Amino acid sequence: ILREKEEEGNTEPGISHEFGYDTVDSFGSYAQFKKIRTTNGLYVSGPLWIGEFGNAQKLDNVWWNYTLRLLKESDVNWCYWPLDAEKVPRNFGEWAPDGLQDTYGIFDTYHRDYSAVVGWKLMDLLSVQAPDPGKPI
């Protein structure tokens, strides 16, 4: 629908301009961040699931903080991706004998045995799991 509007000469940005895989998601404020997402998906007036979002760092990560804020304000369901600490396990193949780590995962890459989580990620995610007290359960 968004692309059809663009083709008809509508000046509203489409999903490929503001939120596409081939573009940089640029925003200067939380209001711009929220508008991009509202325009390109959160305008749906029904059940919504946000899947596959992740993060590798906490320090100075505006995108991460804005995403958490939007999830909490919108009270939508979501799925964090990935859980694993490894993209490729050790000894999986000759091209990566020590495997490949996944710093976006919930589990700590230092241990690589699923015995520890990255504490700040888990705490941040727990903070957006609580239902909004102003909305029905």
Image (cartoon, helix red, strand yellow):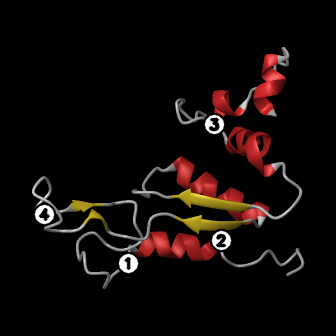
For the residue carrying disc 3, how many other residues have a C-alpha within 10 Å: few (<14), some (14-19), or many (20+)?
Answer: some
Task: Determine the residue positioned at 17% across, 68% down.
Answer: 90
Query: Contact, CB < 8 Å: mark 2 with mark 1?
Result: no
Q: Is residue 117 visible?
A: yes
Left or right of 46? Residue 88 is left
Query: Contact, CB < 8 Å: mark 4 with mark 1?
Result: no
- Distance, label 2 to label 3, CA atoms, is 23 Å
- Distance, label 1 to label 3, CA atoms, is 30 Å
Q: How many marks?
A: 4
Task: Determine the residue positioned at 79% across, 21% down.
Answer: 6
Task: Determine the residue positioned at 81% across, 64% down.
Answer: 47
* Residue 44 image position (x, y, % from top left): 84, 52
Q: Amino acid at mark 2?
A: Val
Identify the residue position indicated by label 2 in the image: 128
Q: Nearer the viewer, residue 65 or 101?
A: 101
* Residue 104 image position (x, y, % from top left): 40, 60
The secondary element bearing badge 2 is classed as loop
Identify the residue position indicated by label 4 in the image: 98
Identify the residue position indicated by label 1 in the image: 117
